[in-house]
Amino acid sequence: MAQMGENEQQPQPHTVLAIDVPITRTQDSNCKSSIHFQYSLSLILTKFHAGYFRITLSLSSQALLWKILIEPIQDAHALRRVFSLIPCIAFTLLWWLALFTLVILSLIYVLRCFFHFESVKSEFLNHVGVNYLFAPWISWLLLLESSPFFTPSTIYYQILWWVFVVPVLVLDVKIYGQWFTKGRRLLSTVANPTSKLSVIGNLVGAQAAAQMGWKEIAMCMFSLGIAHYLVLFVTLYQRLPGDNSLPAMLRPVFFLFIAAPSIASLAWDSISGKFDSASKMLFFLSLFLFMSLVSRPMLFKKAMRKFSVAWWAYSFPLTALALASAEYAQEVKGVTAHAIMFVLSTLSVLVSFVLMIVTTLNTNVLSSPARNHDITQKTNCA
């Protein structure tokens, strides 16, 4: 019995050791993984800023453009029928991609608000950073307009419209209130091309409201946006000195000059029910501004040397111009109008597609501390 007891006790230490070793290693591995995840998350939240919503502006507007181009139209021009060959599944996949990107970036920014509130506060007080706070709400409104699931007559569409528009109005009170109370001296100091995003937010909201039949609300938001657009247009036209007005990496935001009149023409088209003379004048203005910018490629030469998220500033204005050209071609029904629509729409799709590929290949550049430039650190745009 004593020998049996000794034999039973001898293997016990070996059994305990065999169990203890993997537990220790697993705990150590889990601890390292947890520390690495927390460090990576903190790094992302530190460098993330509202300027990244340029990506969602582009994808959301592209979804709306594809929805319009693939719609079947009776007696459509041959150039318009080319886009009808795009399968509906492609539009649906693009819409889901835009939604997924917007949700992810929105969640990251919410976490940034909780864990890096001072950075968000400084962004809100910055004369460039505050304008990009309009970008996520504009993206949500564009996704709502292009949604394959909700129509403007549904209650869900109307509720979501209010959810996305209220933050725009709150930011309007902050920005436009400062311009009004502090006068021309403040506006001439803080006005820059990104200020057009505050105007675009109101115009996109007006367009969505008009599609729901809320003409009075649409007219209210349109008048608010167009009045401040005229003020900004004159102010920026008088004071932009050219190449020295923006840091080299931010010069693509000059294309926002195109976006504002393009979206205004679409908003008025929705309010009036047709692409009338006012919409055409706004479209021609945006087309002229587009030609003025593309004829000066040297202005953007330095911005194209190294990849930056600012490159996405090219896509959304081009897509807005393509949307306006599609409505113009539908109204005029001429060869020239459809040729303009075809060229601009094709260019918009190609630019967005190239940007998606380049961004995918340069994700390490976006996350690198040495390459990432926060918009609140290089915003001397006066």
Image (spheres, rainbow, N blue to C red):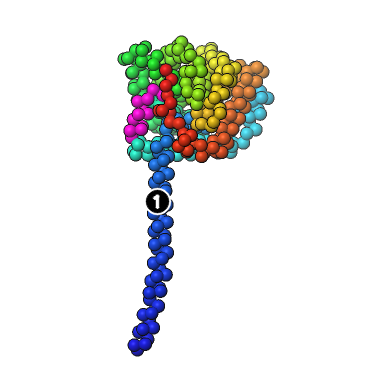
Instruction: Name the magenta segment's main secondary structure.
Output: helix
Q: Position of residue 240 (x, y in %)?
A: 47, 14
Circle 1: residue type? Ser
In the drawing, does residue 148 fall left or right of residue 379? Answer: right
Q: Is residue 120 magenta?
A: yes
Residue 70 location, quadrant? top right
Say which quadrant the N terminus sits in.
bottom left
Observer able to see residue 173: yes
**Most extreme residue toward the right, as rendered?**
78
Q: Is residue 34 left or right of residue 253?
A: left
Q: Is residue 29 above or below residue 171?
A: below
Residue displayed at 36% across by 21% down:
175
Per the image, the residue denoted by label 1 is: 34
**Residue 67 position by quadrant:** top right
Instruction: Please give the name of the residue rendered at 43% of the width and 26% of the height, measured from the top-left corner.
Output: 378
Residue at image position (41%, 55%) is 30
Quadrant of the snapshot with the C terminus:
top left
Instruction: Return the x and y of residue 12 as percentages of the image width and height.
Output: 38, 76
At label 1, counting other C-alpha atoms closer than 10 Å, the crowd grade (few under 14, some 14-19, many 20 or more) is few
Question: Is 309 covered by the magenta stretch?
Answer: no
- Residue at 39% across, 37% down: 46
Q: Secondary structure at mark 1?
A: helix
Residue 260 locus on image (x, y percent)? 48, 19
Q: How many marks?
A: 1
Residue 196 in sight here: no
Please give left or right for residue 254 compared with residue 202 in the image. right
Q: Front-most of 259 and 188?
A: 188
Which stretch appears magenta?
A: 117-128
